[in-house]
Image (tube, rainbow, N blue to C red):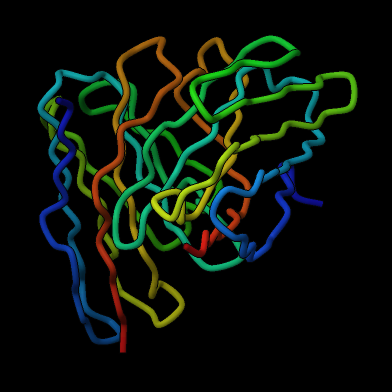
Amino acid sequence: QKEVEQDPGPLSVPEGAIVSLNCTYSNSAFQYFMWYRQYSRKGPELLMYTYSSGNKEDGRFTAQVDKSSKYISLFIRDSQPSDSATYLCAMSWGGTSYGKLTFGQGTILTVHP
Amino acid sequence: DVKVTQSSRYLVKRTGEKVFLECVQDMDHENMFWYRQDPGLGLRLIYFSYDVKMKEKGDIPEGYSVSREKKERFSLILESASTNQTSMYLCASSPRGAGELFFGEGSRLTVL
């Protein structure tokens, strides 16, 4: 079993839809949770960063963490064609492993005009 | 802006060749990483480094080595390339104590 499992997709939605992207994890030592966005032929870039359980909102994006269920989600409201990308969840333990991330497999999202 | 530069975007090599992938970051970051990215497998950590001349194995180090002689430069070496090393290779850096990784644009390696 992988430490981090991500819904594989691909996901195709119409413009304006609400998108839900999800990851589960098995290692309760993970303390920091991130979502990266990767456009085609580019490196990943950080989209959202959370530590505690609960919701964190940034514009049209909401990151949700449920440590008791070992489940994280990223919601995109009013999705736009420019949101079309691969979304990767990532997690780390903190401490001396702070910079070392474990990634999910990635979900390819396409938003149609 | 933080910039992580990978020297080659696309490489084609033959089985058995020695391959060098170079990565340079310009933000004085302590941590540097090499990941490979494959469809359905996500990003997997090959090696990382917390300081000059220091290296630690990641999850899939077999067939790879690294070198960090200067703080800004982290090289990935494939001593004898094999077809199963055909992949996208991503270099990243981060400051000490920070969780965010800054990635380069990737080097797509094809081994024939």
The answer to whether residue B80 is left or right of residue A30 is: left
The answer to whether residue B8 is left or right of residue B90 is: left
Q: Tell me where residue B28 appears, x and y as whole percent.
A: 15, 18
Residue at 74% in and 13% down: A54
Q: Tell me where residue A50 appears, x and y as whole percent.
A: 59, 17
The answer to whether residue A98 is left or right of residue A50 is: left
The answer to whether residue B17 is left or right of residue A48 is: left
Residue at 18% in and 27% down: B2
Q: Tell me where residue B27 appears, x and y as whole percent.
A: 14, 21
Q: Quadrant of residue A26?
A: top right
Residue at 78% in and 39% down: A24
Q: Quadrant of residue B97?
A: top left
Q: Is residue A44 above or below residue A62?
A: below
Q: Is residue A8 above or below residue B87?
A: above
Residue at 13% in and 39% down: B24
Q: Tell me where residue B39 appears, x and y as whole percent.
A: 54, 68
Q: Nearer the viewer, residue B2 or A73?
A: A73
Q: Is residue A22 above or below residue B102?
A: below
